[in-house]
Image: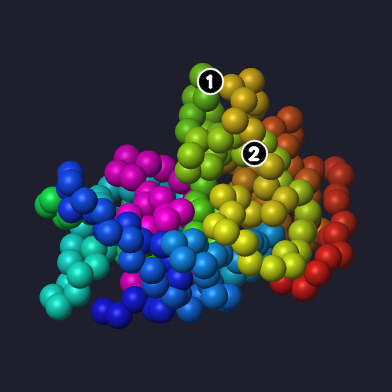
Amino acid sequence: MNIPPGIGVCEQFLPTRAVWVGMLIATCLVAAPAFATVVRPYSFDGLVQRAALIIEGRVTKAEARQEAGSRYIWTDVTFEILDTMKGAWPGHEIRLSFLGGQLGDRALQVTDMQIPEVGETGVYFIANTDGRHTQPLVGWQQGHMVIKKDFNGDPRVFTPDRQSITGIDGKWDAAAPSLAPATALGVHTSSSRAATAISLANLKLAIRERLSSKSPQSLNHHQSASPPTQTVPFEQGARS
């Protein structure tokens, strides 16, 4: 498989040496500087609309592989589908391929790529399901949300690096690509231990509202999963 021509890739021969390889990736929309990854920032609405499939899933398997005649390592991640919020998929599992991973004494690390880990449960905004893309999630990390239970056993929503997602605003339009944004525009996060993340139920509610073409809501951790009473109009910005 040929990698689409500007993400930064660190190829490591463990544990002694590392060689940086620059590639240009077509889906980045603009040319990337050396070793940088340029990803389009999405609004939350954009994540929902761009995704072909949105699931709540649990990672059950992650297997690294290297195709014949290629130097690149891929990791095939298998998800058990727990709930589907958009799209349809035959069966109860889906397998997605991510560029990077470790195979024997070799590791390939893609700048700003975080591959879902075995045992992880999350909500995944999947752009491509055919297994032929460097990163199959919408907006890379923007389309990757991790679910963790709080002290009461209630599922809450976090970023892959475990920051609390504390609220979701209405529509925000992005003017230009940027260097691998960690969250979509309008998705608010906090690294404070005192912060309370929004519930999984509220995240699903926000997704389904976008799909039903209702006015977008502002959600925060204080709101319940019942329909909110206050709406936030779309903000007008630069074209995405």
The x and y percentages for residue 63 are 21, 55
Residue placed at 21% from the left, 51% from the top? 17
Which of the 4 quarters of the picture holds residue 73?
bottom left
Residue 152's label in the rendered image is 1
Q: Which residues are magenta?
A: 108-133
Task: State the image coordinates of residue 92 (x, y, percent, origin top left).
Answer: 34, 58
Residue labelled with disc 2:
189
Q: Amino acid at mark 1?
A: Asn
Three-letter code, disc 2:
Thr
Q: Main secondary structure of the magenta part?
A: loop
Q: Dot 1: within a 10 Å radius of its alpha carbon, few (fewer than 14), some, or many (20 or more) residues?
A: few
Which label's residue is closer to the chain start, 1 or 2?
1
Quadrant where the N terminus is found in the figure: bottom left
Q: Nearer the viewer, residue 191 or 117?
A: 191
Q: Secondary structure at mark 2?
A: strand
User: Percent position (x, y) of residue 171?
Assistant: 77, 59
